[in-house]
Image: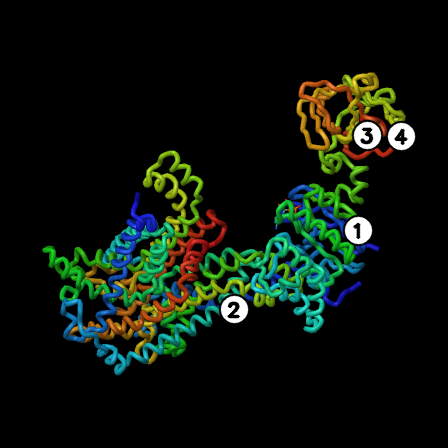
Amino acid sequence: MKPAWETRFPNWRGDLFTLALLVIVLFPFVWIIQLSFRAKADIFDSAILFAPTLENYRALWQGNFALSFVNSIISATSATALAMIVGVPAAFALSRASFRGAHRIGLWILVTRMAPPVAFTIPLFIVFRYLELHDTRTGLVIIYLTFSLAFVIWMMKPFFDAVPRELEEAAAIDGCGTWKTFLTITLPLTGPGLAATAVLCFIGAWNDFFFALILTRTHASTAPVAIVGFMQYVGWEWGRMAAAGTLVMMPVVLFSIVVRKYLVHGLAAGSIKG
Amino acid sequence: MVYPGAVAQPWTERRDRELVWGLVPALIMLASLTAGPIAYLWLTSLTPLNLAQPATQWNFDQPLANYASMFGDPRFANSVVVQVKLSIASVVLQLLCGLGVALLLHPNTKIRTVARSGMLVPMVLPPIVVGITWLALFTVDISPIHRLFAWIGLPFGPLLTNPSTALWAVVFAGTWQHFPFAMLMSLAALQMVPEGPIEAARIDGASRFQVFWHVRLPFIAPTLVVAGLFILIDSVKAFPLLYIMTDGGPGEVTEVTNYYVYRQVFTFSLWGYGSAIAVLMMIAVFLLSYLIDRITRRNDGAWA
Amino acid sequence: MSVVRLEGVWKRFGNVVAVREVDLQLPRGGLTVLLGPSGCGKTTTLRMIAGLESVSEGRILIADREVTHLDPKDRNIAMVFQNYALYPHKSVRENLGFGLKIRGVPAAEIESRVASASRLLGLSELLERRPKQLSGGQMQRVALGRAIVRDAEVFLLDEPLSNLDAKLRVQMREEIYKLHRRISKSMIYVTHDQVEAMTLADQIVIMRDGRVQQVGSPLEIFDRPANVYVAGFIGSPEMNLLDLRATGGTLKSRACTVQGERLRGLVEGTTLKVGIRPDHVEVLADSASASATGWLDVEVVEHLGTTTLLVGPFDDQRLRVLTGRASVRPGDRLPVRLPADRLHLFDSGTGLRIEEPSSLKKRSPG
Ligand SMILES: Nc1ncnc2c1ncn2[C@@H]1O[C@H](COP(=O)(O)OP(=O)(O)OP(=O)(O)O)[C@@H](O)[C@H]1O
Ligand SMILES: [Mg+2]
């Protein structure tokens, strides 16, 4: 007979291997976080145990990093809000419409989502120069919309596709107009999809590096761009970079944990069903 | 009898018209943010634009000069070669890792369900953080990896400054960051494989590998193809890791096309030339998107 | 006065014609069943009446008002969907009251109408639940309740029972029957189940390939099917349809002869489709075999309990005979009689019912 624990965990071999793999995969992530708590003198030390310190974070707080962090929050949140407000009804319309050309719009949205950022950056850089949107949060939000909006539409459409038409027909008979039906019936049923979409959209804008690198300098520079600033010093500030990196990834990781369930669903829906 | 609400137009058509109003703001925004700029990009690609010399902006004397000079530009040719290497390696590695981990995590045990979420972490991390993390991990004097290998007697030098390893070090970091995407898609596809044929194959005495090869793989192959195309497109956009880890170097060994355009435009101010290359990249991405669209529509009727 | 009238209604989906030239009048207060095989256009017809599908050609009137182009909400109809279409995020109470709330009915009135409808349907205990927490039968009731609360002119029901298991289906069928008598609302009920149609309907509309085949009360349709299709569609076991030739005031095939006063007027030499229900075929005692129409070679014997179904060749054709309990075995050869007054005669070309044989006289055969 097998020992009791083996009947309780019949897959222990696979489980153990899974755990080991998870540890390996998450190692860089954990390692960079611990690095941020090491004092300058401890960074080159190989000892696993060390006296944790907040000196790196304190240094960040005293520098310009706080402003960049706020810039990141404001521009990512605004871009997400705008993209959701405009994109969600559009996704619904595309999902429900029987008019011709709906499919071509879908392809266009896919292309937009796939396009290399540099292709938008070149023309928008020139336009922003005329509109004096350089190094402004408004400018950043606008450029984030180039991908957020397409992403929201692309992501939400399958969620709307999954809502049975009969519900909307029942609402139409009950007396709702097209958009009232959308607001009272369809939208509440796609709650998880909305949450997943908003979170992923936020993460997309929050994680942006390329646009912010090119279109901002000091006033509107975002946290990822600020991190790069630490690379310019002689004798790189590893501790500060790690601390800044930890701060930048913290919201993203927290968000992902909170909406973990919908995230997997959302990512899968977004990628497979598209 | 005429009823007040009567309109000579059926509800379904009216509904379509109302729906269009939901689409209009998005279309206007998309047009002005994407179609407009792309058109402008194309115009720019026909000029020798240099922002320091305003006269060059609308100079269409030699509209195809930029496109012509691409052919005689060894650095551009090099960037395409680097791009192809990076793309192929990314697609192959990410698909293999993603599918492998998905097969491991597919059974529903408690630990594996938790691991499914844990494995997603690299994918959501800001690329910049991934960049500095791996930059640090590839830095000899602080990296525990280097220490570990030195300890077991296999020390190796810095990878990122070595021309023969730099690109592969970046590909490695990129695979760590992006494999969860292939994993998610594989997991979702594996979940949709019907149990019937798997059990039938088991009863017929197929080994685990045979079940995978003859039953599961054919079912998930279309998904893997789509995932591969997505990875391919994303690899064309590679930027942050390169910027942080190698800055295109040493020399030009990690300078992919995207990075080359960035250099041409924002370092050397060759806006016209950079635009021309970007136009070609757009065309490539468009073709790949079209392919994805065709495949996904054939599979399940939804546009990707 | 008819509550719903369709005049020359067509529906095309691209190249597919789902409904062709349908003319219908549905009586006020009656329960009309649209009956037909899958894909015959029942749902499409119902959805056009509801306004969910546009009409390609023709007019629809509800309560003598043209509604062809009106919104569903302006037609004063209520609909019960096949999958119920209850709003999953609303409680039963909110589901029932939603239509009234949207129309701006005062809260107090909504409250009382919801209360009375839920009492009628036995839903009072369930008002705070979500649809997910209900059984199939309960969801069905809520769907009905939503229509009742609205107090619409016409109720439209699309296969309302098809998602229930067999037992519950019979029970809900009875409830709908009682409900209809009780509230005496005009109802249009779509089904492909002829038992449902026969038991519920005041009027049955039989459709096939988008065309109306016959309109009538259940017994009218059963007793006087308008054409070969309806004859074969209604009734179980299916009606026998034989090819017989009119010869000298009788109907004949190779080795069988049907005689009867009724058959005198048939035009000599025409071939007819002759229908007879299995339970109208008489099995004779051997002693009476002289008066037999022909002989049945029994191949299949199905004991159904009270009755027995015998199937087998009958003079080159197949015949189904339903008798009482009988100890017949496969291989037996039985004398049977087809009583002339039970026969349904159809033109073998057009498939249409021949009302009086005398009318055939005027037409030339072929
Ligand atoms: N939206 C549509 N587009 C194209 N063809 C359609 C559409 N809706 C229905 N049809 C076609 O119209 C015909 C009638 O369909 P309908 O749904 O009315 O049949 P039905 O009698 O309700 O059948 P069932 O008993 O299977 O529900 C079918 O051939 C169907 O394929
Ligand atoms: Mg139907």
Q: Is residue A232 above or below residue B257?
A: below
* Residue under label 2: B25
Indicate which disc, 1 or 4, sits on the residue closer to the N terminus. 1
* Residue under label 4: C358
Element marked by disc 2: helix
**How far is the residue under mark 2 from the one under mark 1?**
46 Å
Element marked by disc 4: helix
Residue C66 locus on image (x, y percent): 77, 59
* Count of numbered marks: 4
* Residue under label 3: C343
Some atom of ligand 1 lies within 8 Å of the CB belonging to the residue at label 1: no
Q: Residue furthest left?
A: B153
Neighbours of disc 4 within 10 Å: few (<14), some (14-19), many (20+): some
Task: Indicate the amino acid at tag 3.
Answer: Leu
Check if mark 2's residue and mark 4's residue have beta carbons within 8 Å. no
Residue A201 locus on image (x, y percent): 41, 66
**How far is the residue under mark 3 from the one under mark 4?**
15 Å
Q: Chain of mark 1?
A: C
* Residue under label 1: C25
Asked if residue B233 shows in the view, the reply is no
| Nearest to viewer (mark 2 / mark 1) | 1
**Do the residues at pointers 2 and 1 share their chain?**
no
Neighbours of disc 1 within 10 Å: few (<14), some (14-19), many (20+): some
